[in-house]
Amino acid sequence: MCLAIPGEIVEIAGEDLSRTGTILFGTVKKQASLAFIPDAAVGNYVLVHAGVAISKVDEKEARRIFGYLEEIDEISG
Amino acid sequence: MKYLDEYRDPAAARAYAAAIRKITTKPWTIMEVCGGQTHAIVRFGIEDLLPEEINLVHGPGCPVCVTPVEIVDKAIAIAAMPDAIFCSFGDMLRVPGTEKDLLSVRAAGGDVRIVYSPLDAVEVARKNPGKQVVFFAVGFETTAPANAMAVHMAKTENLKNFSVLVSHVLVPPAMESILSSPQNKVRGFLAAGHVCTVMGTAAYAPIVQKYKVPVVVTGFEPLDILQGLYMCIRQLEEGRAEVENQYSRAVREDGNLPAQELLGKVFRVIPRKWRGIGEISESGWGLTEAYAAFDAENRFDVAGASRAEPTECISGLVLLGQKKPAQCPAFGKTCTPEHPLGATMVSGEGACAAYYRYRKTEAA
């Protein structure tokens, strides 16, 4: 139920509560509200749930999972 | 697809599994809160990668499962009204009420529509001014911003033929309910990542402090879950209890502030009954006075009868992490996804339904 899918914003239209993005999920384009992500821009990835973007994906944080174990090993030495 | 496939990489998963084995010295019971995580754990066989000391139990985080029968009955009664169009997420249609489900209302000629978003239901109301359009607003904090937006739009546009049947539940009170049970076995939590994208991580600090359990906000892909487990087990082994954020690519400490602002206007905290568990105080959201005109329970005079849960069903204990699906005598026999007896079998994300789909052989 709480499934949210990451997709890339390819177009933005409207303002405030009507701010809507065209979001590319793989090869499928769908409309989603961007009202709750006021700083989202074309090219950003957002998590979309029930037609509404609820979070912007942070690219830098997204990569951390892959270096995490090495990082931990280094810290615990 | 970006931000999905990368988190299913088998080599990275094996590295996390090895790291977990390396740090685990004692038995620990850890609960993943969200039904989406349960589904991923069972589907990708994550438990098979873990050392035998780690016992994963599955939490109450499936809003479809915990929607009380009375509300499902009200939905069914509204959907059967001649001038109603009843809109719902697809997974609510098969949830059994006292006598039938929404699918059977549709089969009998009722106008029951599956929508992808509550905003689509608002559009149905705009296009059908002669009909009463009702949206079944179920969900956790993740779904609440979309539902709040739909209600707010209807009010702004003065759409008099739109209302919502609300059954919103909240995650932190359910976690407290689990931890305060004398039978509780859960020593650490993987908290529901998407709930936290909306609400942030602050709500878990009092829980961590009061019950001394680690809470790791975790995502939904196999690597997310393995990293979340690693972080949780590491805290347990080191005797720490902190809120940590595994899902930092999507979750900020404060959550989504514009969404929270609208939620504060549209919803207020109320007690809610959870199917399989019973009433939990301050565990749900209802509409505020300002939006009460859009509450379908006020608009339509429909009563929801209460049905006792079948005695052989142990879904309450499964939701609280005290039993596993295969420990139920009815599992896979008198209780199946086609004929569910209780909360955890009614939706695909319920623990029993996930076990039935991916691990049926164990029950046979």
Image (spheres, grey):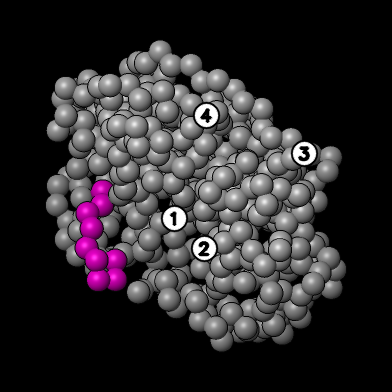
Mark 3: amino acid: Ser
Q: Secondary structure at mark 4?
A: loop
Q: Nearer the viewer, residue B128 or B41?
A: B128
In x, y percent, where is residue A72?
Answer: 65, 78
Whole-number angstrom distance, CA of label 2 to CA of label 4: 35 Å
What residue did someone put label 4 on? B99
Mark 1: amino acid: Leu
Residue depicted at 46% across the width and 70% down the height: A61
What residue did someone put label 1 on? A3
Query: Badge 1 sits on which subunit?
Result: A
What residue did someone put label 3 on? B180
Task: Tell me if label 1 and label 2 are in contact, CB under 8 Å.
Answer: yes
Residue depicted at 77% across the width and 54% down the height: B327
Task: Tell me if label 2 and label 4 are in contact, CB under 8 Å.
Answer: no
Q: Earlier in the sequence, mark 2 or mark 3?
A: 3
Residue B318 shows in this picture: no
